[in-house]
Image (cartoon, coloured by chain):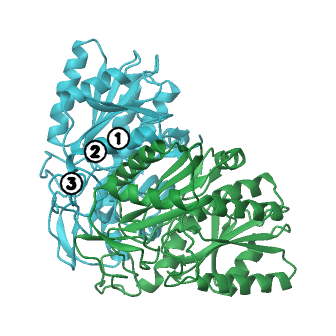
Chain colours: A cyan, B green
Amino acid sequence: MLGSQLEMKKLINDPLDAPAEFLAGLALAHSDLLRVSLDPVYVVRADAPVPGKAGLLSGGGSGHEPMHAGFVGRGMLDAACPGAVFTSPTPDQIQAATRAANGGAGVLHIVKNYTGDILNFEMAAELCQAEGIDVRAVVINDDVAVEDSLYTAGRRGVGATVLAEKICGAAAERGYPLAEIETLCRKVNRRARSVGMALTPCTVPAAGKATFELAEDEIEMGIGIHGEPGRERLPLLPAAELIARMAGMVVADLPFRSGDQVIAMVNGMGGTPLMELYIVYRELHHILEGLGIRIARRLVGNYITSLEMAGCSLTLLQADDELLSLWDDPVLTAGLRWGL
Amino acid sequence: MLGSQLEMKKLINDPLDAPAEFLAGLALAHSDLLRVSLDPVYVVRADAPVPGKAGLLSGGGSGHEPMHAGFVGRGMLDAACPGAVFTSPTPDQIQAATRAANGGAGVLHIVKNYTGDILNFEMAAELCQAEGIDVRAVVINDDVAVEDSLYTAGRRGVGATVLAEKICGAAAERGYPLAEIETLCRKVNRRARSVGMALTPCTVPAAGKATFELAEDEIEMGIGIHGEPGRERLPLLPAAELIARMAGMVVADLPFRSGDQVIAMVNGMGGTPLMELYIVYRELHHILEGLGIRIARRLVGNYITSLEMAGCSLTLLQADDELLSLWDDPVLTAGLRWGL
C-alpha cells in the first residue's frame, strides 16, 4: 500500500493489516500492562499467567476498541483474542490465549452472543479441557433490541460485557475461585440490559464501503455493534426523545424498579463527540431519577464501539453491595483505569 | 425543539443549548469532582477554592471536549470557562471562574493563542487584579503548521495545552507558588510542538453545516482545531506516510534531537476510532525510535477534539526529570485519571 492512495478516509496502511497494527501499537504504548502474540493473535497481561489466580479471557471481532484488547491488565482481563474486523476469533487463537491466561486455577471465557463466537469458543474450550485446563464459559446476551439477528440466535451480547469484565476481573484479582467468578458473571449478565442506536454506519477497512445505508434524516434504533439491523428506523429526534425511548426499552425489560440502584454506561459507538455523550447522560439521569432509579456509578465514553459509527448505547446494571464493591476495586488497563 | 426533527445528525436537543447541557451532564456524572455555574458559565473543582493553593484556570470555546471542563479536578485544573462552540469565553465568565479558583495564592490563566481568547483573558485578568487577585497568564502556541491563521496572530495553541494543564496541575497540588507554576508552564510551552490533520470537517451545532469542505479523496494537513485552514491539502495517504510527514514537521521545529526523551500525545479529533489512533502511535514510535528519540510517557485518545471531526494530532514534549515526575503524579478528572 505504501506510496499508493487509500480508498477510504482512515488512518491506516493496508486495510487487512489494521487489527494487527493496532495491537502492535497497543503493545508499544502499554508494554507495562500487556504483550501481544501475533501467531496466533492474542493479547495477554504482561505478568501472565498469574499463579493461582483464575484467568479471565474474552474476545470477538476487532473494531470494537477499546474492548477487548484495551481491557487487558490488572483488575480486568488476563487475555483477549481479537479476530479480524467484525469476525470471530478462531479456535486456535482462543486456545493459545487460554493457555497463556491459565495460572493453574482455570480460565473463564466471557463470550458475547454471536453464533460464530459461541461455536469457536466452545471448540477451543473442548481443546483446552482435553489438555487439563478447567475452562468455564458465560455467554453475555444483554441487548433488548431484537430477538435473533443477523449473526445471532437469541439476544446479542453488547455493553454488559464491559461491566462483566470489570467486575469479574476485580473478583479474580481478589482471589475468587473460578466457579464463583462464573456465578458472578452470570449474575451480571442476568441483571444487565442494553440498547444501541446509530446516526451513521461505519466502514470495515477490508470491505471499503459502509456496512449499511442510512438516509440523511433517519437513524437506526436498536442497532447491533456490527451494523446489524435494529428494531426500527426513525427520523432524527432530539436527544430527550431518543433517550426516553431507549431508557424505556431497557428499564421495562428487566424490569428495573423504583428503589433500584444501577451502574450505568453511556457508550459512544466510536464517532460521537464527548459533548453529545454527556448530553445523553443528562437525559438518562433525569429519566431514571423520575422513575426512582439511582445511578450509583457510571461510565461515559467510548468502551464498546463500531469503528467510527456515530451513535450511542445505554447499559444499566442492577447493582448491589457486592457488585458496587467489586466495581470500585482498582483497575489498570489501556481503556479503563482508576485507583492505580 | 422537542417534538420537532433535528436538522443534523447529533445527539443533542436545541443546538444552542448543547454546551450548557454538556456541562449539566458532566456535573451530574462527576459531582464528586466538580460543580457548574450557569450564570456566568464556568466549571470549578468541587472543593474550590483550596486555601493556600495556587489556582489553575483555562478556557476557550466549547467543542474540544474533554478539554477544558473535563480536566477540572484533583491534580489538574481548578476551573474552566467554556464559551459557546468554537467561541471565546467572555471576560465576565473568566473573572467569575478566577474568583472561584482563587484560594488566596493567586490564579494562573492558561490561554490558547487565539486572538479572541487573548483579549478576553487579558481583560478579565485586569478586572481580577483590580480586586486584588494575583493573576498571571501563559499563552500556549505550539502548533507548527502555520504562522498566523484565521483566528490567530502567530502560532495556534493546541495539544501542548493538555500537557501543560496536567503538569502545572500537579505542581499546584504539590504546593508550588504561583510564580513557579507560571515559569513551569512557559517551560512546557517552550519545549512542546504539535501538528494536526483532518480527514473530515465537523459541524458546529448552531451553524448546522460543515465548517469547511473536503473532497472524498483529500485531507487537510496542519488543520486548526476550529477547522482553520492548514498548510496544504493532500490526497489520502497511508498512515505511514502521513505520520512521517507530521512527525517530521514537529521534530524539525524544536528541533527534537537524538537522545531526547519525550512525552507524546496521539490525539483523536473526536470522530476517529481508537484502532486508528494506536496505528498512528505505532508509526510515531518507529519514526522517533529511528531518530534516537525515546517516548518516555504517552497519551493515546481523544483529549483536544473538534466535535466529530475525523483526524488526529501529534504533540511532543521534550521531557526532563522534573516534567516526568510531575506527569506521574496522580490526577483525577473526567477526562484524565490515574493513581486515584
Give B245 or A154, whichever is nearer the viewer. Answer: B245
Indicate the amino acid at tag 3: Pro
Q: Position of residue A201 (x, y in %)?
A: 22, 64
Q: Which chain's residue wears label 3?
A: A
Q: Position of residue A92 (x, y in %)?
A: 21, 26
Q: Earlier in the sequence, mark 1 or mark 3?
A: 1
Q: Which chain's residue wears label 1?
A: A
Give A37 or B100, whichever is nearer the viewer. Answer: A37
Give B50 or B295, whichever is nearer the viewer. Answer: B295
State the quadrant of the N terminus of chain B: bottom left
* Residue at point 34%, 59% (across, down): A270
Reply above or below: B85 against B101: below
Tag 3, which secondary structure? loop
Tag 1, which secondary structure? helix
Q: Disc 2 versus disc 3: distance between alpha carbons?
A: 10 Å
Say if mark 1 contacts mark 3, CB within 8 Å.
Answer: no
Crowding at dot 1, Cα within 10 Å, few <14 / some 14-19 / many 20+, comes out as many
* Residue at point 81%, 56% (across, down): B176
Say if mark 2 contacts mark 1, CB within 8 Å.
Answer: yes
The label on residue A23 is: 1
Q: Earlier in the sequence, mark 2 or mark 3?
A: 2
Indicate the amino acid at tag 1: Leu
Snapshot quadrant of residue B206: bottom left
The label on residue A19 is: 2
Q: Which residue is mark 3?
A: A205
Q: Disc 2 versus disc 1: distance between alpha carbons?
A: 6 Å
Tag 2, which secondary structure? helix
- Does any portion of residue A92 appear in the rendered image? yes
- Does any portion of residue A273 appear in the rendered image? no
Q: Is residue B276 left or right of residue A208?
A: right
Give A73 or A1, whichever is nearer the viewer. Answer: A1
